Structure formats: C-alpha cells, structure tokens
Amino acid sequence: MRDRPDYVAHAVLILGVVLFALPVWLVFAGSTQDSDAIMRGELSLVPHLSNLSVYTRVFLNGTMGTEPVWHMLLISLGMALAIAFGKITISILSAYAVVFFRFPFRHVAFWLIFVTLMLPVEVRIIPTYAVMADFGLINSFTGLWVPLIASATATLLFRQVFTAIPDELVEAARIDGAGPLRFLRDIVLPVSGANIAALFVILFVYGWNQYLWPLLVATDRGLDTIVIGIVKMIGQETQTDWSAVMATTVLALLPPVVVVVVMQRWFIAGLTEGEK
Amino acid sequence: MDRRTVFNGRLLPAVLLLPQLLLTFFFFYWPAGQAVWSSLITQDAFGQGWVFVGFENFADLFTDPLYVDSIVRTVFFCLAVSVLAMGIALGLAVFADRAIAGRGVYRTLLIWPYAIAPAMSAVLFLFVLNPRVGLLGRWLNHHGIAWDYTLNGAQAMLMVVSASAWKQVSYNFIFFLAGLQSIPRAVTEAARMDGAKGWHRFRTITFPLLAPTTFFLLVVNVVYAAFDTFGTIYALTQGGPGKDTETLVIKVFRDGVINQDIGSSSAQSVVLMVGVIVITAVQFRFMGRRTLS
C-alpha cells in the first residue's frame, strides 16, 4: 500500500489544480487569438504565441476607450501599497499604545476600534459617500485609500502579537534606558517581522481587489483601477475587442498572484496562526 | 490584555492612537450614525425638509415582497456558496494532507487563487460560460442545451454561485489543510490500528476534530458570500435578469446609488449592520477571538 504512489490523491489534486488553472489558461490563450474569431465563438485552448504583441498594445494604449493598462495598473498598485502600508502603520501604533501603556479610557479606545469589525463598507455605502463628499475626497486618489486603512482586524492581530512579547524584554529595555519609541523600533518591530510580512500579503491583495469602493468614490476615468477597467470592458458586449480584454485580464491577475506565491510561507503562517 | 511592565506617559499613547481613532470616527461611526438617522426620517422630494417617522422605513421594507425575496435569495446564495466552497476545499485538503510526492507543488497550485479579486472571478467565468464567446457556454448551446445566464434566472444564480464559490475554495483549503496538519498523527494512527478504514476514519475521527475550523470557516464564508461577492455578481449579472441574482448588498447599491432612494437604502444598511453584528456575536460567543480574515 505504501510502496506504490497514491493514485487517487494525485488524481483528485490534479483535478483541483486544473479547475483553477483552466480558466486562466483559457484567457491567456484567448488573448493571443483574433478578436473576430472569438466573437464567432472560435475561442480555443491553444495559444498563438506569435501574437503576443497584444500585450504591448493594451499596456501602452488600453482598449475600447479605457485608460492605458499601465496607468490602471499604477492606480491599483498605488492603492494596494497605500492600503497595506497605511493599515499596518496605524494598526501598529494603536496596538502599541493599547498594549504598552496604561491610560484612562484605554479599554474604551480599544472597544471603539474593535466594534468597527462589524461595519464593513458594504453596509454603509450611502452615508460614507456623503462623508467623502463633505471632505472633498470624491474623485481623488486619497479618497481611494485613506478611508480603507482604518480597520479592527490588523489592530487585533498586532495586539495579540505585542501581548506575547515577554515582560522581561520590556524590563530589560527600560533598565537600559530605552524609551517607548526606541523599544518599538529596536525590539517590537523586528520581532513582529513575520506577522507584518503576512499581513502585507493579505492587505495587498485586499487593496488590489477592491471593486465596490472605487466604483463608488471615483467616477473619473483617470482613477480607474485595473479591476474597474476590466469590468467596464466586459460591460460592452457588442463590438468588444476580446483579445485585448483577455490580455488585460492576465495583466491584472499577475501582480497579486505573484505576491501571494512568492510570499506564500509567511502568508499561510500569518493567516492560520492568527486563528489559534 | 494586561501586562506587568508598561511605559509611563499619557500624551504619547494618545498621539499613537489618534490616527486610527480619527479614521474610525469619520469613516465608520459618523456614516453608521448617519445611516441610522436617515433610516428613521423621511425627506421630501427636494431635500428641503425632513420628518421623523420612527420605524416606518423598516415597516415598509419588511412588508415589501421584493425585499423579503431578496432576503430569502441572499440566504440561499450564502448557504450554496459556503457549502460548495467548503466541500470542495475539504476534499482537496484531505488528499493534500497525505504523504504524497509533490505535495508542496500541489499546495502552491491550489493556494494562488486566493489572490483573485471577486470581480475578476466573474470575468474568468464569463470567458468560460458566456453563451456567445465562452468556450463551454457555446459548446452547451451547440449541443442542444439552451444555456444563457443573461436571460435565464436559474442559470444566472448557478453562475454567480459557482463563480463566488470558485474564488473562495483556496482560502478554505488553506485553513482545512492547517486544521488537518494540527491533528496529532498518533490519533489517526491509533484509529488506523483499530481497523478504522478511510471514509469511516474520516467521518468518526478527522471530521469531528476539524469542527472548530469548519465552524470558523462557515462564518467567514457566509460573510464573504453576503458582502464580498458584490463585485462578482455586479460584473456578471448586475443582479439580473430582472432581480434573479439581486442579493441584499446589490439591492442596497441599486436602491441607494442608482435610484437614490435614501430612506429605504439607509434602512437596508441598518438591517445589514444588525446582521453583521449578530454573526460577529455568534462567532465570538462560540469560538473566542479568531478574527483575522
């Protein structure tokens, strides 16, 4: 039993891999084919590798009245990085205050942050729009990321991590005369490195994948993220330049997939350890 | 939460907390308060004045058959997505947990879809199943099956459920695999020695030991299906044909952003908030603080 390969396991897992890879392969193959042929329903799984020029074309010029793909990718990248770094920064600061200081209303402050777990953006669409308008943040890049960086989850994670730092370490630092900010920089941040890396992956993907929020607060074409751009493209089902849409789709999928695959080790540990 | 050794000072912690609290106030509490307030008043057509109407907006909402339909539809949608996404993920995780060659490769190839945006899963499904350009969609129509999710409501529902579940499998897979790996080998070995065979061993030993993971994932999947699938549904069907795939979040968006019915959409927002609060409370009541999602 143990000597021969476990055929059933391999079969099931290969089936699973194909289930996920096939649509992406189809889109890649389609991107190299003729749009008119795709319109006639002649989409095939065999790519025409001589036709990769479509990638340069959409990257530089966009298609069907959208911004060039490089521009939409840049907006998405900016939004994802700003959300990831912004969220990590303000969460570290607030968790540090709650864990390493004693001050009045400490528990109130923590609960005020904690309760926002229960208010995802989807449930406060309309009033948040009004607040954004009051601040003049509609159709601005700032509006795309600033409101999304406040969240309870990252603060809770860092609170957990910081609470686990042994008291002896804090005492030693104090005896050495290190102030709170120096302790944060020299001890707390380095020991939280793995958690920060894990959270970065999760938040980068979260930021890159936003759809409802940019749809709501940015109608200006110049602020279209790549996800918004593609959904606009597939919305015009007549006279669609399908191979260009497919090439754009491949380009939109690459960055977050690369981040997840490359940082896989930290990402999985961070995701599942936070649960225990 | 309390540690023995802390730093002194009051100004510094206040400054450290300030950015988080300001953002939380302006983008969470303020709009949430506005939603509650707008749900309790009614404005005249020109936005000039308002009248306090108490729970009238809510009464209107729950007597509106379209809203009740949307609730039922959302519950069905959430359960279908959760069961499908969790079932497939568990199946894959059980086999990926076996000692086979290339398991690391399999793991990577099953985890990457975590990175796909909900709206992008809709785009990928379109290329597979669109009746005119999709590979499989055209094949079905060629072979005598009238497949068109833009016209047929049941097919539209099947489409948004599949696309939403497809995207969520990898997340569930990561957790089920971690759950399986944390089961001590001694336990499964003991069951094996007692003669418990594959399916029986899974049903009586493994699955019960996975219960905490399963419950946690059920909550996460229901929340995902209820809220995060906006992009998937909106990109594929916009809630149509008719209202056949209009979940509660799609309805809030249609009523509030597109039709500008502020009173009703605010009341709907408040209902959703209560829903999230209940789910979160259940989650914390039964499983302590597992929060990162």
Image (tube, coloured by chain):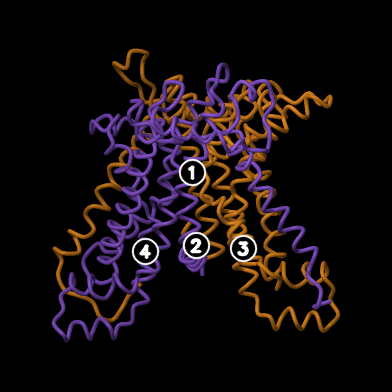
Q: Is residue A252 left or right of residue A131?
A: right
* Label 2–label 4 contact, CB within 8 A: no
Tell me which amino acid carries mark 4. Ile
Mark 3 Cα-neighbour bin, 10 Å: few <14, some 14–19, many ≥20: few
Callout 4: SS: helix
Residue B235 in percent (x, y) is at: 54, 30
Residue A272 in percent (x, y) is at: 52, 65
Which chain is the one coloured orange?
A: B
Tell me which amino acid carries mark 1. Val
Ranked by sequence position, the earlier of labels 2 and 4 is: 4
Residue A196, numbered circle = 4
Mark 2 Cα-neighbour bin, 10 Å: few <14, some 14–19, many ≥20: some
To which chain does the residue with label 3 belong? B
To which chain does the residue with label 1 belong? B
Split into 4 quadrants, where in the image is the N terminus of chain B?
bottom left
Out of B246 and B201, give the one closest to the viewer. B201
Residue that badge 3 annotates = B105
Residue B274, numbered circle = 1
Residue that badge 2 annotates = A264
> Foreground mark, 2 or 4?
2
- Kindly identify the residue that appears in the image at 38 percent across and 55 percent down: A152
- In 3D space, how far apart are the residues under numbered discs 2 and 1 (Cα atoms)? 35 Å
Which chain is the one coloured purple?
A: A
Residue B242 in view of the camera: yes
**In the displayed image of the protein, which residue is found farthest to the top?**
B46
Q: Please say if B58 is above or below B215.
A: above
To which chain does the residue with label 2 belong? A
- Kindly identify the residue that appears in the image at 50 percent across and 51 percent down: A257
Are callouts 1 and 4 both on one chain? no
